[in-house]
Amino acid sequence: MVNISRVTILGSTGSIGQSTLDVVARHPDRFLVYAISAHSRIDLLAQQADTFNVAVVIVPDDSAAQRFRAVWTGNKPIPEIRVGAAALADTAADSNCDVVMAAIVGAAGLPAALAAAQAGKRVLLANKEALVAAGALFMAAVREHGAELLPIDSEHNAIFQCLPHDGRASAPAGPAPGVRRLILTASGGPFRTRQWSELTEVTPEQACAHPNWSMGRKISVDSATMLNKGLEVIEAHWLFAMPAERIHVVIHPQSVVHSMVEYEDGSVLAQLGQPDMRTPIAYGLGFPERIDSGVGLLDLALAGRLDFAAPDVHQFPCLNLSFQALKAGQGACIALNAANEIAVDAFLNRRTAYTNISRIIEATLDWHAAQASTLLNSLEDVLVVDQLARTFAGNSSLVSR
Ligand code: NAD
Ligand code: MG
Protein backbone atom coordinates (compact mmCIF):
# COMPACT_ATOMS: atom_id res chain seq x y z
CA MET A 1 0.00 0.00 0.00
CA VAL A 2 1.60 3.29 -1.09
CA ASN A 3 0.63 6.68 0.27
CA ILE A 4 -1.02 9.00 -2.22
CA SER A 5 1.10 12.09 -2.98
CA ARG A 6 -0.74 15.31 -3.71
CA VAL A 7 1.02 17.09 -6.57
CA THR A 8 1.00 20.74 -7.63
CA ILE A 9 2.24 21.44 -11.15
CA LEU A 10 3.33 25.02 -11.77
CA GLY A 11 3.35 25.53 -15.53
CA SER A 12 1.11 22.54 -16.32
CA THR A 13 0.38 23.68 -19.89
CA GLY A 14 4.08 23.71 -20.87
CA SER A 15 6.18 20.93 -22.28
CA ILE A 16 7.37 19.70 -18.85
CA GLY A 17 3.94 20.28 -17.31
CA GLN A 18 2.22 18.10 -19.92
CA SER A 19 4.83 15.36 -19.59
CA THR A 20 4.32 15.43 -15.82
CA LEU A 21 0.57 14.94 -16.22
CA ASP A 22 1.29 12.09 -18.63
CA VAL A 23 3.38 10.28 -15.98
CA VAL A 24 0.94 11.07 -13.16
CA ALA A 25 -1.95 9.64 -15.21
CA ARG A 26 -0.17 6.27 -15.29
CA HIS A 27 -0.27 6.03 -11.48
CA PRO A 28 -3.72 6.94 -10.18
CA ASP A 29 -2.98 4.83 -7.08
CA ARG A 30 0.05 6.97 -6.19
CA PHE A 31 -0.65 10.56 -7.20
CA LEU A 32 -3.48 13.01 -7.30
CA VAL A 33 -3.14 16.46 -8.81
CA TYR A 34 -4.02 19.15 -6.29
CA ALA A 35 -3.27 22.33 -8.28
CA ILE A 36 -2.13 23.38 -11.74
CA SER A 37 -1.19 26.75 -13.25
CA ALA A 38 -0.85 28.42 -16.63
CA HIS A 39 0.11 31.85 -17.90
CA SER A 40 -1.67 31.43 -21.24
CA ARG A 41 -3.54 28.58 -22.99
CA ILE A 42 -6.38 28.81 -20.46
CA ASP A 43 -8.51 26.42 -22.55
CA LEU A 44 -5.89 23.72 -22.17
CA LEU A 45 -5.69 24.47 -18.44
CA ALA A 46 -9.46 23.92 -18.17
CA GLN A 47 -9.21 20.60 -20.02
CA GLN A 48 -6.41 19.45 -17.72
CA ALA A 49 -8.34 20.57 -14.63
CA ASP A 50 -11.36 18.57 -15.78
CA THR A 51 -9.39 15.42 -16.67
CA PHE A 52 -7.42 15.37 -13.42
CA ASN A 53 -10.18 16.64 -11.09
CA VAL A 54 -7.90 19.29 -9.68
CA ALA A 55 -8.98 21.31 -6.64
CA VAL A 56 -7.20 24.55 -7.54
CA VAL A 57 -6.09 26.37 -10.70
CA ILE A 58 -3.87 29.44 -10.78
CA VAL A 59 -4.16 31.98 -13.60
CA PRO A 60 -2.29 35.26 -14.15
CA ASP A 61 -5.12 37.82 -14.01
CA ASP A 62 -8.86 38.44 -13.81
CA SER A 63 -9.42 38.18 -17.54
CA ALA A 64 -7.79 34.72 -17.54
CA ALA A 65 -10.05 33.78 -14.60
CA GLN A 66 -13.09 34.91 -16.61
CA ARG A 67 -11.90 32.93 -19.60
CA PHE A 68 -11.48 29.85 -17.38
CA ARG A 69 -15.07 30.18 -16.12
CA ALA A 70 -16.33 30.70 -19.68
CA VAL A 71 -14.66 27.59 -21.09
CA TRP A 72 -15.45 25.31 -18.12
CA THR A 73 -17.79 22.69 -19.47
CA GLY A 74 -17.30 19.95 -16.92
CA ASN A 75 -20.36 18.60 -15.13
CA LYS A 76 -18.24 18.71 -12.00
CA PRO A 77 -17.96 21.73 -9.72
CA ILE A 78 -15.50 24.27 -11.10
CA PRO A 79 -12.12 24.27 -9.28
CA GLU A 80 -11.11 27.12 -7.02
CA ILE A 81 -9.50 29.81 -9.19
CA ARG A 82 -6.56 31.66 -7.65
CA VAL A 83 -5.22 34.74 -9.42
CA GLY A 84 -1.79 36.34 -9.76
CA ALA A 85 1.89 35.66 -9.08
CA ALA A 86 1.45 35.69 -5.29
CA ALA A 87 -1.11 32.87 -5.64
CA LEU A 88 1.58 30.73 -7.32
CA ALA A 89 3.86 31.04 -4.29
CA ASP A 90 0.97 30.55 -1.83
CA THR A 91 -0.17 27.40 -3.62
CA ALA A 92 3.39 26.04 -3.79
CA ALA A 93 3.47 26.32 0.01
CA ASP A 94 -0.13 25.09 0.50
CA SER A 95 -0.42 22.41 3.19
CA ASN A 96 -2.75 20.45 0.88
CA CYS A 97 0.12 19.42 -1.39
CA ASP A 98 3.24 17.32 -0.83
CA VAL A 99 5.07 17.58 -4.15
CA VAL A 100 5.63 20.67 -6.29
CA MET A 101 6.73 20.41 -9.91
CA ALA A 102 8.42 23.76 -10.66
CA ALA A 103 7.96 23.93 -14.44
CA ILE A 104 7.41 27.62 -15.09
CA VAL A 105 9.91 29.00 -17.59
CA GLY A 106 12.31 31.77 -16.58
CA ALA A 107 13.01 33.71 -13.41
CA ALA A 108 9.23 34.26 -13.16
CA GLY A 109 9.17 30.79 -11.58
CA LEU A 110 11.64 31.67 -8.82
CA PRO A 111 9.31 33.02 -6.09
CA ALA A 112 7.03 29.97 -6.25
CA ALA A 113 9.88 27.44 -6.44
CA LEU A 114 11.51 29.11 -3.45
CA ALA A 115 8.21 29.11 -1.56
CA ALA A 116 7.93 25.34 -2.14
CA ALA A 117 11.44 24.84 -0.72
CA GLN A 118 10.66 27.07 2.26
CA ALA A 119 7.55 25.01 2.94
CA GLY A 120 9.68 21.84 3.05
CA LYS A 121 8.03 20.18 0.04
CA ARG A 122 9.43 17.62 -2.33
CA VAL A 123 10.47 20.02 -5.10
CA LEU A 124 10.86 18.65 -8.61
CA LEU A 125 12.94 21.39 -10.17
CA ALA A 126 12.74 21.84 -13.93
CA ASN A 127 12.89 25.65 -13.67
CA LYS A 128 16.70 25.97 -13.87
CA GLU A 129 16.52 29.78 -14.07
CA ALA A 130 15.44 29.80 -10.40
CA LEU A 131 18.75 28.23 -9.37
CA VAL A 132 20.78 30.39 -11.74
CA ALA A 133 19.29 33.56 -10.29
CA ALA A 134 19.21 32.56 -6.63
CA GLY A 135 21.27 29.40 -6.12
CA ALA A 136 22.64 30.23 -2.67
CA LEU A 137 19.28 31.37 -1.35
CA PHE A 138 17.44 28.41 -2.83
CA MET A 139 19.85 25.76 -1.53
CA ALA A 140 19.87 27.38 1.93
CA ALA A 141 16.06 27.19 1.96
CA VAL A 142 16.17 23.50 1.00
CA ARG A 143 18.59 22.80 3.85
CA GLU A 144 16.88 24.92 6.48
CA HIS A 145 13.36 23.69 5.81
CA GLY A 146 14.17 20.04 5.12
CA ALA A 147 12.84 20.15 1.55
CA GLU A 148 13.61 17.30 -0.83
CA LEU A 149 15.12 18.65 -4.03
CA LEU A 150 15.04 16.43 -7.13
CA PRO A 151 16.57 17.81 -10.31
CA ILE A 152 14.40 17.26 -13.37
CA ASP A 153 16.73 18.77 -15.97
CA SER A 154 17.87 15.57 -17.71
CA GLU A 155 21.60 16.21 -17.19
CA HIS A 156 21.23 16.93 -13.49
CA ASN A 157 18.82 14.08 -13.02
CA ALA A 158 21.42 11.82 -14.68
CA ILE A 159 24.18 13.12 -12.38
CA PHE A 160 21.92 12.71 -9.36
CA GLN A 161 21.34 9.11 -10.39
CA CYS A 162 25.11 8.51 -10.74
CA LEU A 163 25.97 9.98 -7.32
CA PRO A 164 25.66 7.99 -4.10
CA HIS A 165 22.59 8.83 -1.98
CA ASP A 166 20.73 7.35 0.92
CA GLY A 167 17.15 7.54 -0.33
CA ARG A 168 16.67 11.21 0.60
CA ALA A 169 17.38 14.13 -1.67
CA SER A 170 18.76 16.93 0.49
CA ALA A 171 21.13 19.78 -0.36
CA PRO A 172 24.77 18.57 -0.17
CA ALA A 173 27.18 20.57 2.02
CA GLY A 174 30.09 19.93 -0.37
CA PRO A 175 31.06 17.86 -3.42
CA ALA A 176 30.25 14.17 -2.96
CA PRO A 177 33.32 12.30 -1.69
CA GLY A 178 35.42 10.58 -4.33
CA VAL A 179 34.02 12.61 -7.23
CA ARG A 180 36.55 14.22 -9.57
CA ARG A 181 34.36 15.89 -12.19
CA LEU A 182 30.81 16.26 -13.41
CA ILE A 183 30.51 15.90 -17.17
CA LEU A 184 27.45 17.49 -18.74
CA THR A 185 26.51 16.32 -22.21
CA ALA A 186 25.08 18.76 -24.77
CA SER A 187 23.46 17.89 -28.07
CA GLY A 188 24.88 21.01 -29.74
CA GLY A 189 21.37 21.94 -30.91
CA PRO A 190 20.24 22.58 -34.49
CA PHE A 191 23.32 24.67 -35.42
CA ARG A 192 25.99 22.28 -34.17
CA THR A 193 27.69 22.00 -37.54
CA ARG A 194 27.25 25.64 -38.59
CA GLN A 195 29.77 28.45 -38.13
CA TRP A 196 28.70 31.40 -35.92
CA SER A 197 29.18 33.83 -38.85
CA GLU A 198 26.57 31.90 -40.88
CA LEU A 199 23.85 32.37 -38.28
CA THR A 200 22.92 36.06 -38.61
CA GLU A 201 19.80 35.32 -40.63
CA VAL A 202 18.43 32.26 -38.83
CA THR A 203 14.74 32.38 -37.92
CA PRO A 204 12.99 31.46 -34.66
CA GLU A 205 11.52 28.42 -36.44
CA GLN A 206 15.01 27.17 -37.37
CA ALA A 207 16.37 27.84 -33.89
CA CYS A 208 13.44 25.99 -32.25
CA ALA A 209 13.81 22.89 -34.43
CA HIS A 210 15.82 20.86 -31.93
CA PRO A 211 17.16 17.62 -33.41
CA ASN A 212 16.39 15.38 -30.39
CA TRP A 213 14.16 17.02 -27.77
CA SER A 214 10.73 18.59 -28.06
CA MET A 215 10.65 21.54 -25.64
CA GLY A 216 9.25 25.02 -25.02
CA ARG A 217 10.43 27.82 -27.32
CA LYS A 218 12.69 29.64 -24.86
CA ILE A 219 14.71 26.58 -23.85
CA SER A 220 14.87 25.52 -27.51
CA VAL A 221 16.62 28.78 -28.42
CA ASP A 222 18.83 28.40 -25.33
CA SER A 223 19.82 24.96 -26.58
CA ALA A 224 20.73 26.38 -29.99
CA THR A 225 22.98 29.07 -28.47
CA MET A 226 24.20 26.64 -25.78
CA LEU A 227 23.34 29.26 -23.18
CA ASN A 228 21.17 26.41 -21.91
CA LYS A 229 24.32 24.41 -21.16
CA GLY A 230 25.79 27.47 -19.48
CA LEU A 231 22.71 27.76 -17.24
CA GLU A 232 23.09 24.04 -16.55
CA VAL A 233 26.73 24.47 -15.48
CA ILE A 234 25.57 27.07 -12.95
CA GLU A 235 22.68 24.81 -11.95
CA ALA A 236 25.10 21.89 -11.40
CA HIS A 237 27.37 24.13 -9.33
CA TRP A 238 24.54 24.78 -6.85
CA LEU A 239 22.81 21.41 -6.90
CA PHE A 240 25.96 19.38 -6.34
CA ALA A 241 28.12 21.97 -4.50
CA MET A 242 30.71 21.60 -7.24
CA PRO A 243 33.28 24.27 -8.18
CA ALA A 244 33.12 25.59 -11.76
CA GLU A 245 36.50 24.10 -12.72
CA ARG A 246 35.24 20.59 -11.95
CA ILE A 247 32.23 20.88 -14.26
CA HIS A 248 32.89 19.97 -17.88
CA VAL A 249 30.78 20.08 -21.02
CA VAL A 250 31.04 17.63 -23.91
CA ILE A 251 29.03 17.66 -27.12
CA HIS A 252 27.12 14.44 -27.66
CA PRO A 253 24.79 14.83 -30.66
CA GLN A 254 22.68 11.70 -30.05
CA SER A 255 21.46 12.79 -26.55
CA VAL A 256 21.52 9.19 -25.31
CA VAL A 257 24.10 9.69 -22.53
CA HIS A 258 22.36 12.29 -20.39
CA SER A 259 25.46 13.14 -18.30
CA MET A 260 28.26 11.53 -16.31
CA VAL A 261 30.10 11.53 -12.99
CA GLU A 262 33.83 10.86 -12.98
CA TYR A 263 35.28 9.44 -9.75
CA GLU A 264 38.82 9.73 -8.35
CA ASP A 265 39.64 6.14 -9.33
CA GLY A 266 38.92 6.91 -13.00
CA SER A 267 35.48 5.28 -13.06
CA VAL A 268 32.92 7.21 -15.06
CA LEU A 269 29.24 6.51 -14.36
CA ALA A 270 26.73 7.57 -16.97
CA GLN A 271 22.95 7.52 -17.17
CA LEU A 272 21.55 6.62 -20.59
CA GLY A 273 18.06 6.68 -22.01
CA GLN A 274 15.85 7.99 -24.72
CA PRO A 275 15.61 11.78 -24.94
CA ASP A 276 12.21 11.87 -23.23
CA MET A 277 11.65 14.07 -20.16
CA ARG A 278 9.17 11.58 -18.74
CA THR A 279 12.14 9.52 -17.48
CA PRO A 280 13.58 12.20 -15.14
CA ILE A 281 10.04 13.28 -14.20
CA ALA A 282 9.07 9.71 -13.20
CA TYR A 283 12.36 9.39 -11.31
CA GLY A 284 11.57 12.55 -9.32
CA LEU A 285 7.97 11.55 -8.66
CA GLY A 286 8.76 8.00 -7.61
CA PHE A 287 12.11 8.51 -5.83
CA PRO A 288 13.55 6.42 -4.29
CA GLU A 289 11.38 3.89 -6.13
CA ARG A 290 11.43 3.42 -9.91
CA ILE A 291 8.05 3.79 -11.56
CA ASP A 292 6.78 3.42 -15.12
CA SER A 293 7.19 6.59 -17.19
CA GLY A 294 5.77 5.38 -20.49
CA VAL A 295 9.22 5.59 -22.10
CA GLY A 296 10.03 2.59 -24.30
CA LEU A 297 13.15 0.49 -24.66
CA LEU A 298 16.48 2.06 -25.55
CA ASP A 299 17.65 0.33 -28.70
CA LEU A 300 21.42 0.91 -28.70
CA ALA A 301 21.87 -1.27 -31.76
CA LEU A 302 19.51 1.04 -33.62
CA ALA A 303 21.38 4.10 -32.31
CA GLY A 304 24.50 2.43 -33.71
CA ARG A 305 27.04 4.90 -32.42
CA LEU A 306 27.55 7.52 -29.74
CA ASP A 307 29.76 10.48 -30.64
CA PHE A 308 31.51 13.00 -28.39
CA ALA A 309 33.39 16.22 -29.15
CA ALA A 310 34.68 19.28 -27.32
CA PRO A 311 32.48 22.39 -27.73
CA ASP A 312 33.95 25.12 -29.93
CA VAL A 313 33.98 28.33 -27.86
CA HIS A 314 33.90 30.57 -30.97
CA GLN A 315 30.84 28.81 -32.27
CA PHE A 316 29.03 29.03 -28.91
CA PRO A 317 30.04 32.31 -27.20
CA CYS A 318 27.18 31.98 -24.69
CA LEU A 319 28.86 29.01 -23.05
CA ASN A 320 31.95 31.06 -22.13
CA LEU A 321 29.82 33.95 -20.93
CA SER A 322 28.10 31.57 -18.51
CA PHE A 323 31.38 30.29 -17.05
CA GLN A 324 32.48 33.93 -16.70
CA ALA A 325 29.27 34.80 -14.86
CA LEU A 326 29.61 31.82 -12.52
CA LYS A 327 33.15 32.89 -11.62
CA ALA A 328 32.08 36.53 -11.18
CA GLY A 329 29.34 35.64 -8.68
CA GLN A 330 25.62 35.57 -8.04
CA GLY A 331 24.87 39.09 -9.32
CA ALA A 332 26.49 38.30 -12.66
CA CYS A 333 24.47 35.08 -12.92
CA ILE A 334 21.25 37.04 -12.36
CA ALA A 335 22.32 39.51 -15.08
CA LEU A 336 23.24 36.68 -17.46
CA ASN A 337 19.86 35.02 -17.07
CA ALA A 338 17.82 38.23 -17.21
CA ALA A 339 19.65 39.51 -20.31
CA ASN A 340 19.17 36.16 -22.00
CA GLU A 341 15.42 36.12 -21.29
CA ILE A 342 15.09 39.60 -22.81
CA ALA A 343 17.30 38.76 -25.80
CA VAL A 344 15.57 35.45 -26.55
CA ASP A 345 12.16 37.05 -26.30
CA ALA A 346 13.30 39.77 -28.72
CA PHE A 347 14.65 37.13 -31.10
CA LEU A 348 11.47 35.04 -30.94
CA ASN A 349 9.44 38.18 -31.70
CA ARG A 350 11.77 39.10 -34.57
CA ARG A 351 13.05 42.24 -32.86
CA THR A 352 16.70 41.18 -32.86
CA ALA A 353 19.00 38.83 -34.76
CA TYR A 354 19.98 35.44 -33.40
CA THR A 355 23.65 36.47 -33.24
CA ASN A 356 22.73 39.49 -31.08
CA ILE A 357 21.68 37.24 -28.20
CA SER A 358 25.26 36.74 -27.02
CA ARG A 359 26.06 40.42 -27.64
CA ILE A 360 23.18 41.59 -25.47
CA ILE A 361 24.25 39.20 -22.70
CA GLU A 362 27.87 40.30 -22.91
CA ALA A 363 26.93 44.00 -22.75
CA THR A 364 24.69 43.33 -19.74
CA LEU A 365 27.47 41.43 -17.95
CA ASP A 366 29.85 44.37 -18.61
CA TRP A 367 27.22 46.78 -17.31
CA HIS A 368 26.74 44.65 -14.22
CA ALA A 369 30.48 44.42 -13.54
CA ALA A 370 30.65 48.22 -13.46
CA GLN A 371 27.89 48.48 -10.83
CA ALA A 372 28.62 48.65 -7.10
CA SER A 373 28.07 45.14 -5.72
CA THR A 374 24.91 44.70 -3.66
CA LEU A 375 23.91 42.17 -1.03
CA LEU A 376 21.83 39.27 -2.34
CA ASN A 377 20.43 37.93 0.90
CA SER A 378 16.76 37.84 0.05
CA LEU A 379 14.38 37.17 -2.81
CA GLU A 380 13.70 40.92 -2.99
CA ASP A 381 17.45 41.65 -3.41
CA VAL A 382 17.61 39.14 -6.28
CA LEU A 383 14.51 40.55 -7.99
CA VAL A 384 15.92 44.10 -7.86
CA VAL A 385 19.09 43.08 -9.75
CA ASP A 386 17.01 40.96 -12.12
CA GLN A 387 14.79 43.94 -12.96
CA LEU A 388 17.72 46.36 -13.44
CA ALA A 389 19.44 43.88 -15.78
CA ARG A 390 16.22 43.39 -17.77
CA THR A 391 15.85 47.14 -18.18
CA PHE A 392 19.46 47.49 -19.33
CA ALA A 393 19.18 44.61 -21.80
CA GLY A 394 15.80 45.81 -23.09
CA ASN A 395 17.23 49.28 -23.79
CA SER A 396 20.04 47.83 -25.87
CA SER A 397 20.38 49.40 -29.29
CA LEU A 398 20.46 45.83 -30.64
CA VAL A 399 16.77 45.39 -29.80
CA SER A 400 14.31 47.18 -32.07
CA ARG A 401 11.09 48.47 -30.56
P1 NAD B 1 7.10 25.93 -21.83
O1 NAD B 1 7.27 27.28 -22.44
O2 NAD B 1 6.63 24.81 -22.67
O3 NAD B 1 6.07 26.06 -20.59
C1 NAD B 1 6.20 27.05 -19.62
C2 NAD B 1 5.04 27.02 -18.63
O4 NAD B 1 5.20 28.14 -17.74
C3 NAD B 1 3.67 27.17 -19.26
O5 NAD B 1 2.72 26.46 -18.50
C4 NAD B 1 3.39 28.68 -19.14
O6 NAD B 1 2.01 28.99 -19.11
C5 NAD B 1 4.05 29.00 -17.82
N1 NAD B 1 4.54 30.38 -17.76
C6 NAD B 1 5.22 31.05 -18.72
N2 NAD B 1 5.52 32.31 -18.29
C7 NAD B 1 5.01 32.42 -17.04
C8 NAD B 1 4.97 33.48 -16.09
N3 NAD B 1 5.52 34.68 -16.33
N4 NAD B 1 4.35 33.25 -14.91
C9 NAD B 1 3.78 32.06 -14.64
N5 NAD B 1 3.78 31.03 -15.51
C10 NAD B 1 4.39 31.20 -16.69
O7 NAD B 1 8.49 25.59 -21.12
P2 NAD B 1 9.12 24.14 -20.83
O8 NAD B 1 9.91 23.71 -22.00
O9 NAD B 1 8.10 23.23 -20.24
O10 NAD B 1 10.20 24.52 -19.70
C11 NAD B 1 9.81 24.79 -18.38
C12 NAD B 1 11.08 24.86 -17.51
O11 NAD B 1 11.69 23.58 -17.51
C13 NAD B 1 12.13 25.84 -18.04
O12 NAD B 1 12.79 26.44 -16.96
C14 NAD B 1 13.08 24.94 -18.80
O13 NAD B 1 14.40 25.46 -18.84
C15 NAD B 1 13.04 23.68 -17.96
N6 NAD B 1 13.37 22.46 -18.70
C16 NAD B 1 12.61 22.08 -19.76
C17 NAD B 1 12.94 20.93 -20.48
C18 NAD B 1 12.08 20.45 -21.62
O14 NAD B 1 12.35 19.39 -22.16
N7 NAD B 1 11.06 21.17 -22.03
C19 NAD B 1 14.07 20.19 -20.11
C20 NAD B 1 14.82 20.61 -19.02
C21 NAD B 1 14.47 21.75 -18.32
MG1 MG C 1 18.94 19.94 -19.80
Image: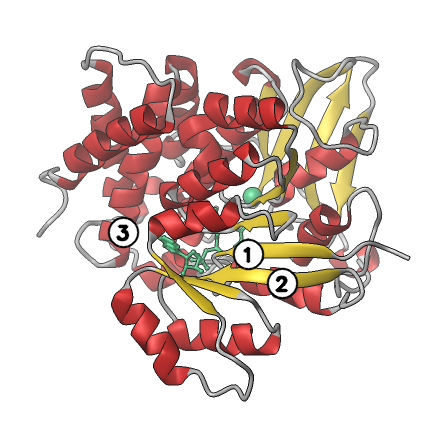
Q: Do the residues labelled 2 and 3 touch (CB within 8 Å)?
A: no
Pointer 1 local density, CA inside 10 Å: few below 14, some 14–19, many at least 20: many
Q: Is residue 158 left or right of residue 390?
A: right
Query: In the picture, residue 358 is in which quadrant?
Result: top left
| Residue at which label 2 appears | 33
Q: Residue furthest right?
A: 1
In the rendered structure, which amino acid carries the disc numbered 2? Val
Q: In this view, does 11 lie above or below 384?
A: below
Q: Is mark 1 in CB contact (under 8 Å) with mark 2?
A: yes
The secondary element bearing badge 1 is classed as: strand
Q: Check whether the beta carbons of the residues at disc 1 and disc 3 lie within 8 A of each other.
A: no
Instruction: State whether residue 41 is above or below residue 127.
Output: below
Residue at horizontal 67%, vertical 52%? 281
Q: What element carries label 2?
A: strand
Quarter of the image holding residue 327? top left
**Looking at the image, in which quadrant does ligand 1 appear?**
bottom left
What is the spatial separation of the Cα atoms under label 1 and label 2, in whole angstroms?
A: 8 Å
Q: Going by the image, does 296 lie left or right of 88? A: right
Residue 144 against residue 86 in the figure, above or below: above
**Mark 1 vs 2, N-terminal side:** 1
The residue sitting at 70% across, 33% down in the picture is 159
List x then y, in percent, for residue 163: 77, 28
- Spatial CA distance of label 2 from label 3 is 31 Å
Q: Tag 3's secondary structure?
A: helix
Dividing the image into 4 quarters, which one contains the N terminus?
bottom right
Disc number placed over residue 9 in the picture, else none: 1
- Looking at numbered disc 1 in the image, what kind of residue is underneath it? Ile
Residue 345's mark? 3
Where's residue 145, x and y in %? 60, 27
